[in-house]
Amino acid sequence: MQIYKAPLNDIKFILNNFLDLSNNHSILSNSEFEISDLEMVIDQAAKICEETLLPINQSGDLEGCHFENGKVTTPKGFKEAYKSFGENSILIEWTSIIDETILKNILLFKSEIEKKISTNNVYLKSSYNSLLITYPIINNTQNKVLELKKIYQEINFIKKQVFNKWEIPVCYDLSFGSDLGYLEKSLSIDKKEIISLHSKKEYRVYNIGFLPGFLYLGGLDKKIHHPRKKNPKFNIPKGSVGIGGSQTGIYPNESPGGWHIIGNSPINLFDSEQSPPCFIKPGDKVSFISISLKEYELLKIQVESKLYVFNKTVTND
């Protein structure tokens, strides 16, 4: 059985940390380019390679390309595989900003599409300001666009959506918060105040990416906004809580990274053996609960023993 996993960690490390696109993307020709959009493209490319191209890879090696009558044709199945992710997709975009109203509109639109179009016949991927709809085949693009417009126009955007609100324990001890000292000097804010500002806010999950289970959380207090590191670290410990620009997030696994680390959470945000592997979804809310080092060690034992139970509530906000 063939197995292939796209090297997403390596690719995103080069883009986000080595090339530091979050600070240098203005050099690209499209000034409205968003890093989250690029990550969505990379994630989808990985999915195509792993789920669509891998199964036909062996037959492609055996059959090879054909040259007949001056034309080159690909092995059986390749044309259909690539075509399904090009001509058969529709990308809908909203204003390129991080905004709760836009996110809720996208998620509500996605939900309505799932209700009215069989998920066996459509693949949906949402981001901060876009929704990608991919069909097995599109015979008439205009009809599909009109169908989507009709669904969108019939949506009651006043309708309350149901999300989960999660409490995530975080230890802000200096043994974990390796960048607290730097942020204290750079922001001219006391470490305790940084911790207080970070732990008292309620955050919205805007996207999941970079690493499987990495939550991009919006709502960070403007007082502690800070650009990513110019010189990223190669080994950020699992569970590290960081600040990157106007967002905060948690590293679900050990990884290279350029966010400023201020604490650590003992919980698992991504487990490939669970279904779904990432239980938190875009639109959900997250609040951080400050815990002591002793409490952290106790919770870590509970997590490792699979005895830890998340504190979760349902909200329509």
Image (cartoon, grey):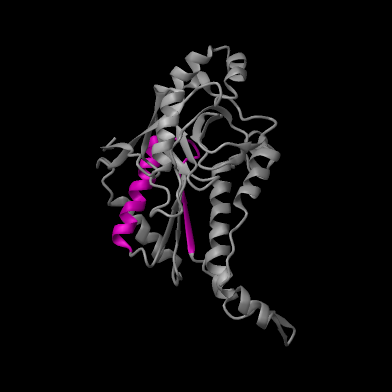
Q: Is residue 183 magenta?
A: no
Image quarter hosting the C terminus: top left
Q: Is residue 186 visible?
A: yes
Q: x, y percentage for residue 88?
A: 49, 66
Report the residue at 25% width, 40% height from top. 160
Q: x, y percentage for residue 34?
A: 57, 41
Q: Is residue 283 above or below residue 90?
A: above
Q: Is residue 92 magenta?
A: yes
Q: x, y percentage for residue 252?
A: 50, 41
Magenta stretch bounds: 89-117
Report the residue at 46% width, 33% height from top. 265
Q: Is residue 128 visible?
A: no
Image quarter hosting the N terminus: bottom right
Q: Nearer the viewer, residue 115 or 284?
A: 284
Q: Is residue 140 above or below residue 35?
A: below
Horizontally, is 160 left or right of 188 in the view? left
Q: Nearer the viewer, residue 152 or 79?
A: 79
